[in-house]
Amino acid sequence: MNHLDTPSAVQRRPSVIVTPTVVVLIALASAAASQALAATPLPAPLQALQKQGLSIVGTFPSPGGMTAYAAHAGTEPIALYLTPDGKHVIAGSLFDATGRNLTTTALDKVVAQPMAESIWGQLAKSHWIADGREDAPKTVYVFTDPNCPYCNKLWADARPWVDAGKVQLRHVMVGILTPTSAGKAAALLGARQPAAALDAHERAHVASNAKTLASGRPKPLGDDSLKPLAVIPAALASQLDANAALMSTYGLQATPALAWKDSKGSVQMRQGAPESDLAGIFGPR
C-alpha cells in the first residue's frame, strides 16, 4: 500500500458526487479514442493541464472546428475543447442552436471506464487495513476514523458478510473526527498486526456503542481499547495525509464512506452506515 498523489483542481463540471448515494460511473469507455490519443502527442495546452494533475483519456466528436477531449480530475469528468489554432483550450459544455447539451452523453461514454480504473487504482494504493478474506468475491473500501461511532456500527453490521468470506472490507484509515483520531489511526496502521488490532478495537466497542446510538446521543469511541500515539512518526503521518486527501478528492466529508463496484463494474460511493442497504452493496448473505 503506497502513497498516491491526488489530482489538483482544474476547471470542472459540477461534481458527480451526490450523497447519500453516488453512482460515479455509468458507461463503457471508447477504446478506439483512447488508443488514438495515446499514439498522438497532445497539444501544448493539454500537456500543461496534465502537469496540473488532469487525466486526459480520449476524444469525442465536436462541431465548430474544435477537437473535444474527455478528461477527469478525481471523480469529476471534464470536457476540453481545443480551438482550431491548437493554442487554447475551453473547459465546459457545448450547446447547439436548440439549447441541447452536446457534451454530457459523449463525455460519459469516453471517460467512464478509464475513470473507474483510475479511482479503483487509487483506492488500492491507499493505506488500508484488510478486514476479511483476501479471496472474498467482493471488495469494499471504507474510509474509517477509529473514533467514529458509525464506523463501528458499520463494522458490526458487516460481520455476517465478512465472517462468511463474501466481502473483504478495506479500511482506509483517516483521523478527522476528534483530536485523538489521528493518533489512533496511526497506531492501527503502525501495529505489528494491523488487522488484529483493528478487530480488537472495533469489537471492544460494539455493545456499548450500540446502546449509545440507540439512546440518540452518539459520541466518539473511548480510548480504553486503543491508545493514540502521542507522537505520530512522519511516515505514518504521510499515510494519513494521503488518505485524507484522497477522501477529499472524491468529495467525501464524513466517515464511514464506502466505495464499491456494482454488478456492471461501475464504482459507487456512499457516506454513512447504511444498515438497511447493506445487501445492495455487499450482495446476499
Image (cartoon, grey):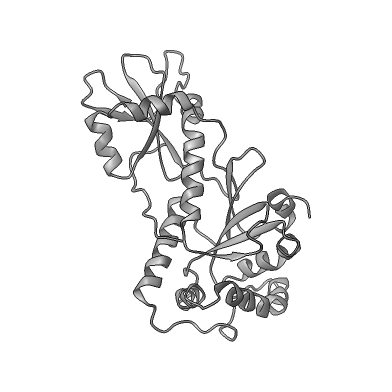
Residues 85 and 165: in front is 165
Residues 83 and 179: in front is 83
In the rendered structure, the answer to whether residue 223 lies left or right of residue 79 reads right
Residues 91 and 242: in front is 242
* 96 versus 222 height, above or below: above
Residue 170 coordinates in the image, percent (x, y): 58, 61
Q: Is residue 80 visible?
A: no
What is the number of callouts on the image? Answer: 0
* 235 versus 4 height, above or below: below
Quadrant of residue 140 within the rendered picture: bottom right
Residue 196 coordinates in the image, percent (x, y): 61, 75
Q: Residue at x 56, y 84 (%)?
A: 223
Instruction: Tell which residue pokes out farthest to the front in this image.
Output: 135
Instruction: Tell which residue pokes out farthest to the right in this image.
Output: 285
In the rendered structure, the answer to whether residue 69 lies left or right of residue 26 reads left
Quadrant of residue 89 within the rendered picture: top left
Residue 49 coordinates in the image, percent (x, y): 28, 38
Residue 72 coordinates in the image, percent (x, y): 41, 38
Quadrant location, the C terminus: bottom right
Q: Is residue 107 visible?
A: yes
In the rendered structure, the answer to whether residue 39 lies left or right of residue 167 reads left
Q: Residue at x 34, y 73 (%)?
A: 234
Q: Residue at x 41, y 58 (%)?
A: 245
Residues 197 and 259: in front is 197
In the rendered structure, the answer to whether residue 265 lies left or right of residue 80 reads right
